Every structure is written in structure tokens, then in C-alpha cells.
Image: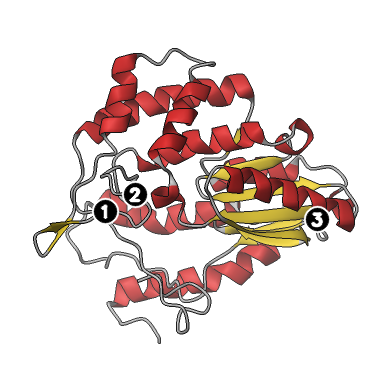
Amino acid sequence: MKDHKDNFANNPTCRLINPSKSEIGKVSKQILDRINKVVTIKAGFLQWKSSKATLDWFRAIKNKRRCSFIAFDIVNFYPSISQELLSDVLKFASAYTEISSADREIILHAKQSLSFNNGTAWTKKCSPISFDVTMGSFDGAETCELVGSYLLCQLPKAIRSKVGLYRDDGLGVFRESARKTELIKKQICSVFSENGLKITIEANKKVVNFFDVTLDLEKNTYEPYMKPGNTPLYVHSDRNHPPSITKNIPLAINRRLNEISSSKEAFDRAASAYQQALGISVRNEEPEP
């Protein structure tokens, strides 16, 4: 159940996580990894894989106070990828690197998903076939990354160079008037709609939460972000994990918070929640409600 979404009480939604993973997905993942690396390098698309990469991009933005964000989220990205869309994506990627017929067959075959409920095969409402990019599949994230490159390529060049994606989350920065930024927003919506995808999008924002960081153009700062209701939880110190792991947990957390904090003040604001979680893991107490 996606009970973390806004208005869940009035509009409950859920996500199907297919527990049966096709083993050929492991092969498909390796093929897609190779394709994604070549496409991203040759085309120069912004495809972030970590918050560090996003922060490098944010720090390089000049005259931040004159800029504003456009932030968007692709609704139900994984299950919304159709067989036709993925076929178009592979054709697009073949312009950058060789994709053999065997590679295509493996990638498409890995998307054949079988789920049963009371003896009846489950299919998506929009399609009677078993094609599906399932949550938790071996190659799902890599498939989304390649589809993302295809979508970025369809944006006008002036927009494409200023927009990046992390799977189903997109972020762009523009030094335009509020009116022009709204027009850019409509162009982005149009591209996704033409490919059968729906997005939620906001423009003219000075502060956004992206990955696990909050980015602020007005103050030129960034700091750790935690979704409401998301409580950090760590293994107890007496558990039988290797001592080298439990000993390094506090150091790893400290290093991580340092990386995504632009100042000591930002670090201190975020540290208390993690410090409490570490204390609980040592005392084996239940977290506070």
C-alpha cells in the first residue's frame, strides 16, 4: 500500500511487487548497463545515480538566486512502460551503440511477467499481454534509466541541457521569467504525455527535496532531507554482524551527513534524528512514536 502518498485516506493506491523474478533479468541488466553507459556518455544526458552527482550539478549552477527549479515525478513509471515504448527506446539507443538481435530478445523476454491470483493469470488493465517492467526485477532500474534517456532526447535542446533524471524523479533549473518557466513546464508535460506517461510537475520553485537532500537556490545551501514518518533504524550493537561493520556504522553516518550538508548548521539540524537511532541500536530500545 502506498500509504506515504498525499491524500491516501481519500484515494488509496497500491503497487504490485511481483515476487517471481525472471533469472534472465540478470543477463538483461548487464546488457542494459553497457547500453546506458554508452548512451549517457555520447549523448551527454544528465542521468544521476547518487545524491553526490546531484550536488555536484547543484554547486555548479551560477547566479542561483536568479534561477528557479522545475521538479517532476513520473507517475507509476515502471508499470507504465509499454512494450511499444521499450521497442522505440531500443531503436533510439541503437544509434549510439550496437544492440544485437539477441540482446533485444533478452531485454524484451526479461519483461515477460507471470503472476497468478486464485488460479487466474494477472494482466495489466491497459494490456492483455504479460509484458511488464516489474518492481523489484533485476533489470527494472536499468530499463527506467534507458527510457529516461529517450525521453530527455525528445526535449528541445535548450531544455534538455538543464534537466536531469534519477529514474522516476526529474529536476531542472532555469534562469527564465515565471511565465516562460511555465511554458517550459508545458513542453515537458507534452513530451511525457506523447509517450503514454503521466507526470506530476511543479515550476518556479526555489527549494526542492530531491534524493535525500533539500536544495535551496535562494540561500545557496543544501542539507539532508528525510521523508515524514521515515525513522532511521540500525542493527543492534549486540547482534552477530561482523564487528568491523557495526564499528563503522557511526563513522559512515557521520561521513554521509557531512557530504550532503553545506554547513555545520545544516549538519547539526539533521544529526539529532540519526543520533537518536544510533542510541536506540545500542540500548535496544523501541523508537519513540
Judged by depth in the image, the label closer to the viewer, 1 or 3, is 1
**In 3D space, how far apart are the residues under numbered discs 1 and 2 (Cα atoms)?**
7 Å
Percent from the top left, x then y, of residue 225? 58, 64
Identity of the amino acid at label 1? Answer: Thr
At mark 2, the secondary structure is loop
Q: Which residue is mark 2?
A: 127
Q: Is residue 275 visible?
A: yes
10 Å crowding of disc 1: few (<14), some (14-19), many (20+): some
Q: Which residue is mark 1?
A: 123
10 Å crowding of disc 2: few (<14), some (14-19), many (20+): few
Q: Quadrant of the C terminus?
A: bottom left
At mark 3, the secondary structure is helix
Q: Residue at x 56, y 48 (%)?
A: 51
**Image position of 192 with respect to 154: above or below:** below
Percent from the top left, x then y, of residue 67? 84, 51
**In 3D space, how far apart are the residues under numbered discs 2 and 3 (Cα atoms)?**
34 Å
Identity of the amino acid at label 3? Answer: Glu
Judged by depth in the image, the label closer to the viewer, 2 or 3, is 2
Q: Which residue is mark 3?
A: 182
Q: Earlier in the sequence, mark 2 or mark 3?
A: 2
Q: Nearer the viewer, residue 276 or 223?
A: 223
Q: Residue at x 40, y 16 (%)?
A: 99
